[in-house]
Structure formats: C-alpha cells, structure tokens
C-alpha cells in the first residue's frame, strides 16, 4: 500500500502517471466495495458494541410518544422484520458506552428500510432513514468521563420507506404485505479524521473525472489525490494531516472574479400526501426538520428553505418542542419559510379564488407565526403554472418565483433559467429555475458543474440556486452534503458555492435583471397531462366544494350585512377552506396519489359538503327567516336564492304541494333572492319530437337540435337561423375511447401516441327515447356500451329560455388503461381556441405547426372552452372536468382515465357529470358564454317558503357584463366589513359600477391579503362605486358596513 514515494513537498516530477490507473487507484482507496480490509473507507468506524437491551411493540396506529412509553415492550433483535405497511413499531434501546471509548466520537447507528425517529428524554432528536443516507445519531463528539455512559433511546419506526411501500417500482401501488427490517442497531466509534479525508478525496476525484482531460485543474486534482494516497498510512492517523494539507492546497486556489456564484440552500421537498397518507406526512416533517435543527446546531452557515404553511401547522400542533426550536432558527434567518401558500398546490386546476386562498391562508399563517410574510412563491414540483399566477403573487406581496419543473418538458427545452414571467394581465414576476434542474441535490461537484453549464442565461446573470437535500418523501440535507460544499466555496475551476437564502439570491438577480428576457403567458408543462383527468371524483369534489364555499360565504356575508348580530362562521369557514386547500396539493388534486390518499381526500370533500350545507342553511335562515315560515292558510311558495352577480331566468325543480318535484321558470335577482309565487310562463315552450327514423328534435326558441338514436348531435342551430354548428357529415357529442398506456408515470401521463388509437363508441344498449315531452323542459336519454364492460347513460336536457343543451352523464367505468373523451366537431374555423383559466382565459392553437403547438395536444381548462370565428362560435361547458383539447375544428372534453399506478383502483366506479354545448352569435364574450358556464356550475337554490308578498332583493349588481363579482366574504381582520373581489373577464379595458343595497359606509381598494391599497377611500356615489379595470385585472374592495 505505501509506495514509499516522494514525500509531500518534494518534487515527484520523475514519476510516470497513467491517468486511468491513477484515477482508479484513488477510487479503490475510498471504495466501500473493494479493498475495505486495507483502504481508507474500511477505517471509518472503529470499535462497536450492540445495545445492552432492545425491546419493542408494534401497533396498527401511529402511537404518540407519551402513550408509547407506557406500553409493554417485548423482546426484539437486529434482523427482525415488521409489517404490514403503515404500522408503527416503537423500540426501546438501552445503550451502555464502554469507558474505554473516552475521548472518542460515539454514534448510535440504526439501519432500517423503514423511516425512523430517535426520541431522547421525551423529545424527538433525529430522523434516521437509510434511503436518506442518515443512519447515525451522534451521542457525543468526544466522550468525557462526566457524561452519562448509560443512555436509553426510543426509536419510532414507521412501516414505510421515504417513498411509501410500493411493490417493485416506486410508483407501484403499496404492497399491503411488505415488511421492514431492522438491519443494524449498535454503538460505534466514529473516526472523524478518516471521514474528512474521504470527503476531500471524493471532491478531488470528482474534479479529476468531471473537469475532463482538456482541463488542467482535472490533472492538478488527480495528482493531489494520488499524492494523498502516497502519504496516507491508513493504520497511522498521524499521517492524515499531511494528506489533508495537500487537499487544502487545491481547495484554497481561488477563482477569478468572473466565476459563477451558486447560492446553496438546504431544502427538503415533502409531498403533503403522495405514496403515503397525510397522517404519515406529519411524521415525515418532524423526522426531516428535527434533523435539520441538529445540523444547524453544528453548522452555523447552514440555511434551510421550507414551504407549506400546512406542514408548519402540523408540526406546531404535534411536535411543540421541535416547533419552538424551529421558531428560534426562523428568527435567526436560517430556517427560512418560503412560498406563502397553504400547500404547494397544483398550478392549473384550483379556481382563481382557491388560489387566492392558498396565499391568504399561507401568508397570514407566516405573518402570525414568524412575524413576516414570504417574498418568494415556491412551487418546484408542480405540473405547470397558470398564466394568472403572476397577478395573484403580486397581489399577495410576492414578486419572485422559483420552480424547476419545466425541465421535465418532454418536447421543448424551456429557453430560460432566469427571466421575467408575465401573466395574462401584464403583471410580471422575477422567476428562477435552478439550472441544475433539481430541488433535491446532494452537494456534488457534478451538480455544481451542471448548474453552470446548463444555465440558459449565461451572460445575463451570474448567480444560480442549488437546493440540496433528499426530497419528495422528505429526508433533507446531510452533514456530508455540507462538507462537500465547504470544499467548493471558492476553488479555481468550480463555481463559487455559498450558503445563501432566497432573498439574497433574488436580490442579486434583481440587480442583474436589466438584461433578462420575458416569457408571456402560461408555463405549460409538456408532461403529466393526464393529471387533468385522473381521479374524476377528486376533480368533482374540488369543483363542488369551491362552489359550496363560495355560496356559504356569499350568503353568510349578506346575512351579516343585514343583521350585525349574525355570527359569521369565520372559524368554520377557515377550517373548511384549509381542507379544500390541502386537497389541492400537487399529488392529490392531480390524482397522482395512492388509494389511501384518495379515501382521505374524498372524506374531506364529504366533510365540506356536510358542514357547508349546515352553514348555508344557517345563513339562509338568518337572511330570510321570516319568509321561510309558511303561514297557515297560505299556499306554499318557494324562495329562490342566486349567489351569482347577475339576474337569471331559469327552470328550477321544486317540491310541489303534493310533495312531488315540479318544474318552474323563475327569475332571480343578482346576488339576492325572490319569492316564487306564480311561476312564469315560458316565452316559448320546449318542443320535443321523435322522427320516424328514431331521431329526436328539440327546440326552445333559442336553439334547435337534432339527435340521432345514439344521442349524437347531427344538427345544432340557433333558432330562426340556418347557420349550422355541427361540421358537415359529422356528429357532435361523439364519444371516443383511446388506448392509454404511458411510458412510466401511469396516473400522470397521457402520451401523444394515444391519439393514434381512437375508437368511436358506437355500441348502442338503449336507443334514444324521449323522457320529458317538453313545455318547461324537454329531455331524451340513451345508453351505450363503452369498451369491454363499461356503460354510459345520458340524459340530454333542453330547458325553456336556456341557450345551451345539457348532457347529464352517468358512467359505470370498469376499464383498464383507456381514455374516454367526448368530441364536438363544429363548423367553425379558427387557428386558436379559448379556454377558461383562473379569473380569465387563454388562447391555445388548434394546429400543430411547431413543436410548441403539438406538445399541447392535451390541455386544461376550467368551466368552459370555446372555438369562435368572426360572428359565430361554439362553447363547451362542464361542471367538473379539466382536461380538454381543440384540434382543427374538433373540441374534445376529456372524461375518464383508468391508470393503475399508484392507485390500482383509480376511477373504477360510477361517475356522474354534466357538460353542455352552447352555439352563439358574435364573440363568446358578447354571447355570455362566461356567465352561462357560471350558471351551469352554480345552480339556483330553491327553498320551501311562505307565499308572503316580498319584493325581490338584490345585494350586489355590476353594470358591465365584462366584470364578474366573484367573491363576497367577511374581511379577515374587520368583522364589520366585507371583502368583494371582482375581475375583468373579457380581456378588455372596462369601467363599471358596483351597486349594493347593503349599508356600506366606506369602500377601499385592498390587495388580495385585504390590506388597503390607498389612504383615500373610493367615492361612494348613489350608483355605488365606480371601478376601472384593465384586461383581466382582479380588484378587491373592502366594504365597511354600518353597525
Ligand atoms: Zn412534490
């Protein structure tokens, strides 16, 4: 082993060096697999000794510490395995440190494929996870005689790994029978000097390998490493300092001024639920963050960046001791809360208001707990980013954004890493993608070099972020990562690597920003496009619960304004919003989670529905209590409530005198109510006629349709018009089934090639029959077989006065790797289709000219999509779908998928959903498509009431059809005020009056966090408040009410 070669400092010039043998020689010297009998790695640990006693108990529940220590522990041994998945084992570990180890560093080493937490004296002290390269709990760094030599630890072992309990591949559904083994539990002496040398050699080896033969630093590093092996006698630690000096000489050779600067930040991406349930995430946070605290204690430079208010809240309530330590480090600026949102939510599907609430709940939490709001939005792992986000960030005190997910694009490489991102209203935020394309780096030379090389904005900016720490399932930074980067602080040939914070990084980027480019519009992820459709029940729960909370807030706010003694249910609403926001996490709402998570999510939706119904009833009772008591002797009437900001005339279903459901045409005022006494006669009744060939025609004086026996639209026209909306020779409302087998990410991905497998659904089970003969409502229904064993039943409904026809759909879905869509080939030519997004809309091409166009073969939309040419168009509305596409003249709505990983049962159940088609003259804006989509999603509420004389009452109305009053809620910090939120929906500059019958004494513009924007209140005139909007602008107004 010893070469007896040149001593350090002596010229060794005469020795021949072969690059490969020199490299491999050093590799073998640090190898964990080869020559450990004589190499340096074999000396990392000294003496060891088993625990004095080891005992355990197992429970199906996640037993907390206080309860666990009181349980009866039975015998346990290293090598024992535990299961099934999701159970918990508590171990009592009694250790006795030999006095002979005085002066040595002593570790408790614990190796298991289950995630562990070490508890000592009633507190969590260290997370241990083999996958996260954490197997040591440091008992003492230098054993003193005065220290206790007998120590009792508890280890809480979860029967799941960092990535859950999948069978085989990572995203396979959990294996219920999987077992987890304790493979090591012992006391060891840790040789810190050996460890430091190993890290030195690793960095030098990486420099030698990765800088390449054309770079002289590669050889300098290699020769230094080779010489270190020469001087190092592994059996004699006295030789180590000389070897370390050789390494230090290389690391101490500094860069020139122009070198790139890396801002390293500790990070630990913890999915709030994914391949494990929410409950396990609480423990993942504790395991990961307590480990960060330990590292902070011994590494004063370490900073750690941490997002998701919900996770802080979990740790606050479950681990108060740990939380207090975190608060300490937050105050010191080292544990850095970022993101400003409740969870790292999906960036596409949540409604505009739900996105506002992500920030409102998040920023308020951060301010309350840590005294300041976040300045950076943080969403490194989400599947695309809505073009509305820049405006929402700006409205919530945030002008900076970090992600990296677009590096996953399948087709096009995104052209920037640092740039301004401009949203649909023109708001801009400074955006940074760490050029290393990761949020879970390990602090290696390779990553630092990639960060510099890959940076697309060379010459514009000279600073980048590196986020290091195991992530997704938690884990976080390790000591070794820190020790690697210490050696790269300023070493010629490598970028400078400094511990930093998001604020420091973005501050220098802001200074350098004059040369930065701007990206306008959505940040579309060219991957994971199946997540707009997967787990349809979650999508439906999300849309419905967004509606429920909207309605409860509107009605409760009106009740409050009418009667200041009404108890606005602020804390209940906060609880329900937080449940909804949690379910919008980026593996839950997208449907990319395991079955256990789906069950939790559906339960949260059920809770919102249940509690929401109760709160709505209380608000209506307070608002119109007098009207709800039917006076004896009076015929029963119906109270009709409208939570939308425009007058509506619609057919509703109500309970008639005999208890049967009867239809009635009613007019309800804008955001208000009316008593229905005499139903209105329809201006023109619906007619439904069956033709001899089995087809059915329906007409209501607004639109006219013709349906074939399979329920397909063969004709769709505006009444009294010859303009046909269905493309020549085609049928609309045509179902199509596609093979849907992605490359790997099953629940996530639908690939371009699925389009080559289209099969129209044409197996008729029950031909179209008239089910309602007309008058106020006409309908017809039919059934189809879909695929091998699924069935679809549809009722096609046309109401009097309604400009769209509805398709009430029920599917018994039993497919495997199939994708069901419904298509509307229309007689409209346009190179762009329009899709609703949060508080606005975007256009996307209907052609595939460039790779950027065809990579968007499957896109997302909210309540509507539209294809229009000058003067005419067709819109497709929906009540719970998000996946869509428009190619050429065919509008498609994505209905159901059937992926098998990570949830083998995904979507195999009964589904109910509704969509509608709306042909229109003029633009979709002028035709009221936006309002119709709201109407479909926010049905009028009909409540039995007295038949008293009562004029219709409207709380709010808006004079411009371009402006939507979306939200009415109690102000967060002023119980005597309500906040209303409006947005410009047409993409136009608009002026409007907001009128209100509420006792408003003062009106002030405020931001999305409800902070007043100007000293001066808005002028309250007789007409209300006059508001000016730029295209897609969102305005919030604080209205103070008279008490
Ligand atoms: Zn994630």
Image (cartoon, rainbow, N blue to C red):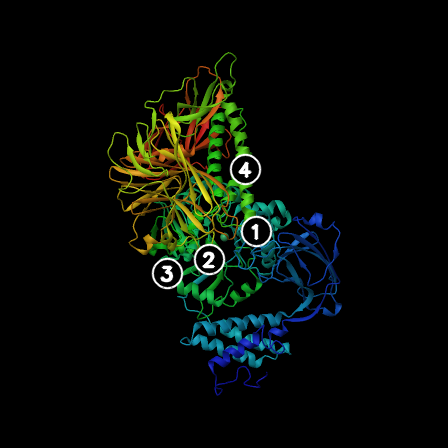
Q: Earlier in the sequence, mark 1 or mark 4?
A: 1
Q: What is the tally of numbered marks visible in this picture? A: 4
Q: Give the x, y percent position of residue 644.
A: 41, 30
Q: Earlier in the sequence, mark 1 or mark 3?
A: 1
Q: CA distance from mark 1 to mark 3?
A: 36 Å
Question: Is disc 2's CB within 8 Å of ligand 1?
Answer: no
Q: Which residue is mark 4?
A: 606
Disc 1 to disc 3: CB gap under 8 Å: no
Question: Looking at this rendering, what residue extends furthest in the bottom direction?
Answer: 14
Q: Quadrant of the N terminus?
A: bottom right
Q: Give the x, y percent position of residue 131.
A: 58, 61
Relative to 664, does residue 431 appear above or below in the rendering?
A: below
Q: CA distance from mark 2 to mark 3?
A: 28 Å
Q: Which residue is mark 3?
A: 456
Q: Which mark is residue 744?
A: 2
* Label 1 crowd (10 A; few <14 / some 14-19 / many >=20): many
């Amino acid at each position: 082993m010893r070469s007896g070669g040149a001593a350090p400092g002596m010229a060794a010039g005469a020795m021949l060096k072969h690059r490969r043998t020199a490299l491999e020689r050093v590799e073998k010297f640090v190898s964990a697999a080869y020559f450990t009998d004589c190499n340096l790695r074999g000396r990392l640990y000294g003496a060891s000794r088993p625990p004095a006693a080891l005992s355990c108990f197992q429970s199906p529940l996640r037993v907390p510490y206080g309860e666990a220590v009181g349980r009866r522990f039975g015998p346990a041994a290293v090598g024992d395995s535990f299961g099934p998945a999701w159970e918990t084992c508590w171990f009592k570990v009694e250790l006795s440190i030999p006095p002979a180890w005085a002066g040595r560093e002593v570790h408790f080493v614990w190796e298991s494929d289950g995630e562990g937490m070490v508890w000592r004296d009633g507190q969590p002290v260290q997370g241990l996870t083999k996958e996260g390269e954490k197997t040591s709990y440091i008992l003492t760094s230098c054993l003193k005689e005065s220290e206790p030599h007998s120590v009792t630890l508890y280890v809480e072992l979860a029967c799941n790994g960092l990535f859950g309990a999948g069978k085989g591949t990572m995203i396979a559904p959990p294996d219920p029978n999987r077992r987890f083994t304790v493979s090591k539990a012992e006391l060891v002496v840790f040789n810190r000097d050996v460890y430091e040398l190993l890290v030195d050699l690793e960095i030098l080896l990486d420099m030698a390998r990765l800088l390449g033969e054309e770079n002289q630093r590669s050889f300098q590093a290699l020769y230094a490493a080779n010489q270190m092996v020469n001087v190092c006698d592994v059996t004699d630690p006295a030789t180590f300092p000389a070897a370390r000096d050789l390494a230090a000489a290389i690391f101490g050779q500094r860069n020139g001024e122009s070198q790139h600067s890396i801002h390293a930040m500790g990070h630990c991406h913890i999915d709030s639920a994914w391949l494990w349930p929410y409950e396990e995430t609480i423990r993942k946070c504790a395991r990961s963050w307590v480990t960060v605290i330990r590292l902070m204690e011994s590494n004063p430079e370490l900073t750690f960046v941490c997002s998701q208010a919900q996770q802080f809240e979990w740790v606050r309530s479950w681990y108060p001791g740990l939380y207090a330590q975190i608060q300490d480090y937050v105050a010191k600026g080292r544990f850095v809360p970022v993101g400003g949102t409740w969870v790292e939510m999906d960036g596409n599907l949540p409604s505009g208001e739900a996105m506002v609430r992500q920030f409102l709940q998040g920023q308020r939490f951060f301010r309350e707990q840590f005294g300041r709001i976040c300045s950076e939005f943080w969403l490194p792992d989400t599947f695309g980013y809505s073009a509305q986000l820049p405006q929402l960030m700006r409205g919530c005190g945030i002008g900076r954004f970090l992600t990296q997910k677009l590096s996953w694009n399948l087709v096009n490489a995104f052209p920037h890493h640092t740039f301004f991102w401009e949203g649909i209203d023109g708001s801009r935020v400074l955006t940074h993608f760490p050029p290393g394309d990761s949020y879970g780096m390990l602090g290696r030379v390779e990553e630092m070099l990639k960060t510099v090389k890959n940076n697309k904005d060379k010459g514009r900016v000279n600073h980048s972020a590196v986020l290091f720490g195991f992530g997704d399932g938690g884990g976080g930074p390790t000591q070794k990562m820190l020790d690697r980067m210490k050696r790269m602080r300023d070493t010629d040939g490598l970028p400078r690597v400094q511990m930093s914070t998001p604020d420091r990084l973005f501050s220098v980027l802001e200074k350098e920003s004059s040369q930065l480019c701007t990206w306008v519009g959505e940040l579309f992820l060219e991957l994971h496009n199946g997540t707009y459709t997967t787990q349809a029940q979650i999508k439906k729960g999300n849309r419905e619960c967004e509606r429920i909370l909207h309605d409860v807030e509107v009605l409760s706010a009106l009740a409050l304004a009418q009667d200041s003694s009404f108890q606005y249910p602020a804390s209940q609403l906060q609880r329900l919003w937080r449940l909804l926001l949690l379910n919008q996490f980026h593996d839950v709402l997208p449907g990319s989670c395991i079955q256990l998570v789906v069950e939790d999510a559906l339960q949260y939706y059920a809770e919102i529905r249940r509690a929401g119904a109760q709160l709505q009833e209380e608000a209506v009772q307070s608002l119109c209590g007098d009207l709800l008591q039917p006076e004896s002797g009076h015929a029963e009437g119906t109270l009709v409530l409208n939570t939308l900001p425009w007058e509506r005339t619609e057919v509703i279903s109500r309970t008639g005198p005999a208890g049967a459901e009867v239809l009635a045409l009613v007019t309800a005022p804008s955001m208000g109510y009316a008593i229905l006494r005499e139903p209105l006669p329809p201006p023109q009744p619906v007619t439904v006629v069956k033709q001899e060939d089995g087809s059915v025609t329906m007409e209501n004086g607004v639109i006219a349709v013709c349906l074939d026996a399979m329920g397909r639209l063969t004709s769709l026209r505006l009444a009294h018009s010859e303009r046909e909306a269905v493309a020549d020779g085609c049928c609309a409302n045509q179902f199509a089934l596609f093979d849907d087998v992605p490359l790997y990410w099953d629940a996530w991905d639908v690939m371009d090639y699925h389009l080559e497998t289209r099969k129209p659904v044409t197996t008729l089970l029950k031909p179209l029959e008239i089910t309602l003969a007309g008058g106020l409502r006409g309908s017809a229904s039919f059934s189809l077989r879909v695929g091998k064993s699924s069935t679809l039943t549809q009722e096609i409904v046309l109401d009097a006065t309604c400009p769209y026809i509805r398709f009430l759909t029920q599917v018994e879905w039993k497919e495997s790797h199939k994708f069901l869509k419904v298509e509307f080939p229309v007689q409209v030519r346009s190179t762009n289709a329009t899709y609703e997004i949060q508080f606005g809309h975007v256009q996307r091409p209907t052609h595939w000219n460039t790779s950027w166009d065809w990579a968007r073969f499957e896109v997302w939309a909210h309540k509507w999509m539209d294809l229009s040419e000058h003067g005419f168009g067709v819109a497709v509305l929906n009540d719970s779908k998000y996946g869509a596409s428009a190619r050429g003249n065919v509008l498609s709505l994505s209905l159901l998928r059937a992926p098998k990983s990570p949830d083998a049962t995904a979507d195999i159940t009964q589904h109910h959903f509704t969509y509608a088609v709306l042909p229109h003259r003029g633009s979709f804006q002028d035709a009221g498509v936006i309002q119709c989509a709201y109407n479909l999603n926010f049905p009028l509420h009909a409540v039995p009431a007295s038949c008293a004389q009562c004029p219709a009452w409207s709380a709010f109305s808006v004079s411009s059809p371009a402006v939507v009053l979306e939200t009415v809620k109690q102000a967060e910090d002023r119980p005597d005020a309500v906040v209303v939120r409006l947005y410009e929906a047409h993409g136009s500059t608009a002026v409007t009056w907001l009128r209100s019958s509420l006792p408003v004494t003062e009106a002030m513009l405020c931001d999305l966090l409800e902070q007043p924007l100007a000293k001066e209140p808005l002028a309250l005139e007789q007409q209300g408040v006059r508001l000016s909007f730029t295209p897609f602008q969102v305005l919030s107004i604080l209205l103070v009410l008279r008490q």
